[in-house]
């Protein structure tokens, strides 16, 4: 396919356009082109332009690229990259790989249209529409500024953390300090790692020729915007200022855009230059203001930098998820940070839940890691503490992830009242006795929903029961021995647990993949609870595939087959969790 398509366009380019061969390895060193042809075309104004037609080894499935041989148009004409290559197709454009010459003719005519429009200055607005690309192309290996800042007016001072790991900007100092503590997993951050910068709000994005390329140019740009920007900028500079970050933010049709400028003070050089900074005979701290500003904002080059947005609203759905604010403000308490509880905690953190209370008395062991989001680095650590460290490190913008390394019965009244401040309480302790006791406490104490989670043998069925203010309580679905009234699987061969050499040390053998489907359903119900979509108690059941069940020696229960009429497995069912007339908790006068 490749050689036939190449020979077709070669014939066309040489025959009809008198093309010459281009040494692509030499001219386009940073690209993976395998062949190139040079042609001359005439623009609408009669001027001749040399173009290169370039192909990669994916040709003809991937269209050829067209390049301007004269690279001086970079950042002067839109859609021209640093090496002259033109952006004529978007990533999603499909091309007919069976008609390589037709595709090439279309691209060449688009290239000529682009040249004509650029010469006439008709397509300059394209620079503003795709401002992010042009800024990124101008950056050229600059530093990266990570941002938690709200990209909105007005111009204002912002906080900057300059750590050895990275540089991060935020609106408030407290927010930034929390982020850094979470990110580093430490309690104290040296104050000299924090400084201030400027966010300059621009009414529209900049054209590339407006990008500041010197410190003086940057200050001029700030002054031209009027308003408070210049005073704020100057307030950041004194004779000891070594460097400065300025964030340039503007509104575009596709949301806000931010680029950053980094200024480093020009260093005084030469024999006899004094230690520290001296200014024409003035002792440090006695330098006139104007001189100090003139020195900092001199002709020295500035570095343009890309901005990586890492604020919560961007991380969790790129500002397009309506529930993001609500989830960020919400709090989830999780009792039991084993494979189920911890996996759900991670999923909720990824979804954008902002506050966690994690409770578990146990330490992580090696075999735990086969189905737990924590790995060998955390073996021997308390599960709640290590999970909190993971959530804080992976999502440093979480507001809180408090760990309590205790069991339910070890919790103080104060700690239990922290559960009461949550929007959802998840019980994943895997012990029905404890959970029935919690149900008893929660029914009289909690106003938030409670989600109880358990698995049937080999994780062949995963149960999530959300207890809401109306409908049944947990006890409604269990008999007085704590056995569930509704079971999905039967195990004709008897006990399914394996023993470790210890009197109560039993475990259920199942792996991460067995768990995934069930935990997904559980996490989804948790999210519905947080978004107040569960008004009355609900039971969600997710089952493994039939062959998985049979492989382990299980069968579907009659009750399950009667409910679903489906034996193939691998699906989920949601049903109401009704109040039972003989539940001692809901109807204390009833007898079983
Ligand atoms: Zn009940």
Image (spheres, rainbow, N blue to C red):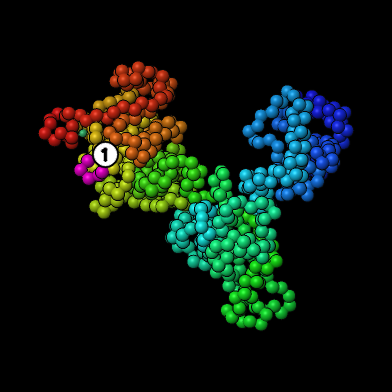
* Crowd band around label 1 with a 10 angstrom C-alpha radius: few (<14), some (14–19), many (20+): many
Instruction: Indicate left or right for 440 with 565 as reference.
Output: left
Q: How many marks?
A: 1
Q: Where is residue 225 in the image (x, y as percent from the top left)?
A: 59, 60
Q: Which of 198 and 585 is in front in this view?
A: 198
Q: Is residue 404 above or below residue 108?
A: below
Which residues lie in the magenta part? 443-447
Q: Where is residue 140 in the image (x, y as percent from the top left)?
A: 68, 52
Q: Where is residue 587 in the image (x, y as percent from the top left)?
A: 15, 33
Does residue 592 show up?
yes
Assign the N terminus to one quadrant of the image. top right
Assign the C terminus to one quadrant of the image. top left
Q: Is residue 271 above or below residue 528?
A: below
Q: In which quarter of the image is ligand 1?
A: top left
Q: Main secondary structure of the magenta part?
A: helix
Does residue 184 show up?
no
Residue at (12, 31) in percent of width and height: 590
Instruction: Indicate left or right for 130 with 542 as reference.
Output: right
Residue at (36, 22) in percent of width and height: 554
Q: Nearer the viewer, residue 496 or 73?
A: 73
Instruction: Indicate left or right for 269 with 501 as reference.
Output: right
Provide the secondary structure element on which disc 1 rests.
helix
Label 1, ligand 1: CB separation under 8 Å: no
- Given the current orientation, which residue lies at the most extreme left position? 589
Residue at (38, 22) in percent of width and height: 553
Q: Where is residue 548 in the image (x, y as percent from the top left)?
A: 43, 24
Residue at (54, 64) in percent of width and height: 228
- Magenta stretch encompasses residue 471: no
Which quadrant holds residue 290? Answer: bottom right
Q: Name the residue under label 1.
A: 435
């Amino acid at each position: 396919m490749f050689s036939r398509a190449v020979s077709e366009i070669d014939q066309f380019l040489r025959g009809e356009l008198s093309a010459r061969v281009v040494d692509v390895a030499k001219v386009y060193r940073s690209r993976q082109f395998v062949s190139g042809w040079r042609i001359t075309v005439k623009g609408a104004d009669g001027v001749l332009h040399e173009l290169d037609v370039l192909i990669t080894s994916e040709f003809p499935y991937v269209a050829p690229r067209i390049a301007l041989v004269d690279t001086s148009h970079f950042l002067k004409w839109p859609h021209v990259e640093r090496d002259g290559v033109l952006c004529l197709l978007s990533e999603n454009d499909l091309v007919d790989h069976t008609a390589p010459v037709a595709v090439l003719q279309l691209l060449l005519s688009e290239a000529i249209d682009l040249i004509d429009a650029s010469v006439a200055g008709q397509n300059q607005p394209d620079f503003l529409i795709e401002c992010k690309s042009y800024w990124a192309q101008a950056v050229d290996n600059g530093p990266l500024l990570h941002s938690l800042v709200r990209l909105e007016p007005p111009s204002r001072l912002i906080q900057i953390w300059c750590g050895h790991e990275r540089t991060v900007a935020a609106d408030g100092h407290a927010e930034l300090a929390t982020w850094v503590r979470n990110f580093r997993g430490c309690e104290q951050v040296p104050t000299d790692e924090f400084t201030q910068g400027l966010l300059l709000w621009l009414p529209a994005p900049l054209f590339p020729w407006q990008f500041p390329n010197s410190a003086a140019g940057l200050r001029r740009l700030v002054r031209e915007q009027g308003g408070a920007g210049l005073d704020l900028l100057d307030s950041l500079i004194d004779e000891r200022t070594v460097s400065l970050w300025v964030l340039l933010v503007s509104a575009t049709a596709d949301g806000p855009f931010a680029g950053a400028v980094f200024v480093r003070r020009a260093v005084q050089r030469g024999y006899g230059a004094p230690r520290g900074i001296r200014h024409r005979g003035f002792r440090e701290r006695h330098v006139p203001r104007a001189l100090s500003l003139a020195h900092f904002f001199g002709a020295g080059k500035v570095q343009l930098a890309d901005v990586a947005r890492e604020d919560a609203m961007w991380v969790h759905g790129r500002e397009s998820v309506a529930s993001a604010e609500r989830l960020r403000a919400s709090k989830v308490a999780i009792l039991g940070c084993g494979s189920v509880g911890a996996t759900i905690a991670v999923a909720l953190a990824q979804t954008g839940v902002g506050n966690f209370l994690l409770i578990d008395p146990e330490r992580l062991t090696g075999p735990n890691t086969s189905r737990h989001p924590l790995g060998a680095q955390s073996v021997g650590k308390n599960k709640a503490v290590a999970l909190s460290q993971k959530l804080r490190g992976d999502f440093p913008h979480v507001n809180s992830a408090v760990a309590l390394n205790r069991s339910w019965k070890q919790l103080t009244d104060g700690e239990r009242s922290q559960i009461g401040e949550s929007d959802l309480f998840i019980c994943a302790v895997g012990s029905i006795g404890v959970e029935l006791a919690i149900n008893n406490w929660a029914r009289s104490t909690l106003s938030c929903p409670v989600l109880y989670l358990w698995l049937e043998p080999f994780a062949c069925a995963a149960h999530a029961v959300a207890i809401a203010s109306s409908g049944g309580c947990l006890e409604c679905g269990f008999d007085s021995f704590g056995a569930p009234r509704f079971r999905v699987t039967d195990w004709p061969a008897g006990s399914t647990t394996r023993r470790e050499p210890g009197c109560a040390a039993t475990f259920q053998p199942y792996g991460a993949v067995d768990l995934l489907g069930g935990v997904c359903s559980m996490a989804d119900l948790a999210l519905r609870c947080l978004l107040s979509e569960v008004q009355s108690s609900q039971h969600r059941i997710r089952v493994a595939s039939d062959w998985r069940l049979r492989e382990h020696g299980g069968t579907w229960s009659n009750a399950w087959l009667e409910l679903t009429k489906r034996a193939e497995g691998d699906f989920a069912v949601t049903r109401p969790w009704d109040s039972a007339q003989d539940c001692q908790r809901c109807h204390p006068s009833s007898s079983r």
